[in-house]
Image (cartoon, rainbow, N blue to C red):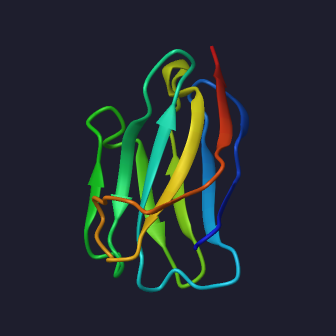
Amino acid sequence: QVELVESGGGLVQAGGSLRLSCAPSGRTFSRYGVGWFRQAPGKEREFVTGINWSGGSTYYADSVKGRFTVSRDNAKVYLQMGSLKPEDTAVYYCAADPRGRGKGPYDYWGQGTQVVVSS
């Protein structure tokens, strides 16, 4: 079992930036693929971005391409969000794939961190 902890959420004005982090509790991420998802009120959870174990492959939803960047180091996976829009408001979740792929499927999920973008 892998416990994932997200951090970095908060309130930001439209056009601003935030950086989210995802870290496993008690272990390293070095062989895991990791994805970020989000769920807005009244909507289904949707894929945002994913990164494979080496960082050599990344994937993005069309809605965030050019605005969001996923990256990683040995300890954490990061989601740099820029040019934020009110429609980016959601709970953001990270998820881990022990097989190392960037597109999942994902076996482990964090509890989520809230992002609110004000207009």
Tell me where residue 40 appears, x and y as whole percent.
53, 24
Q: Residue drawn at (59%, 72%), measured in percent from left and top?
A: 2
Residue 19 left/right relative to 48? right
Q: Residue at x 61, y 52 (%)?
A: 19
Q: Is residue 83 visible?
A: no
Give the side of residue 96 with respect to residue 114, left or right: left
The answer to whether residue 31 is above or below residue 100 is below
Image quadrant assignment for residue 52:
bottom left
The single residue placed furthest to the front in the displayed view is 1
Instruction: Give residue 71's quadrant in the image.
Output: bottom left
Pick the front one: 36 or 88: 36
Question: Is residue 76 visible from the viewing direction of this image?
Answer: yes
Horizontal relation, residue 6 to residue 28: left or right: right
In the rendered image, the residue lying farthest to the right is 10
User: Horizontal and vertical percent for residue 88?
Assistant: 51, 28
Check the picture and name the quadrant holding the C terminus: top right
Q: Quadrant of residue 21?
A: bottom right
113 or 20, which lies in front?
A: 113
Position in image of residue 113 (x %, y %): 67, 44
Q: Is residue 93 left or right of residue 37?
A: right
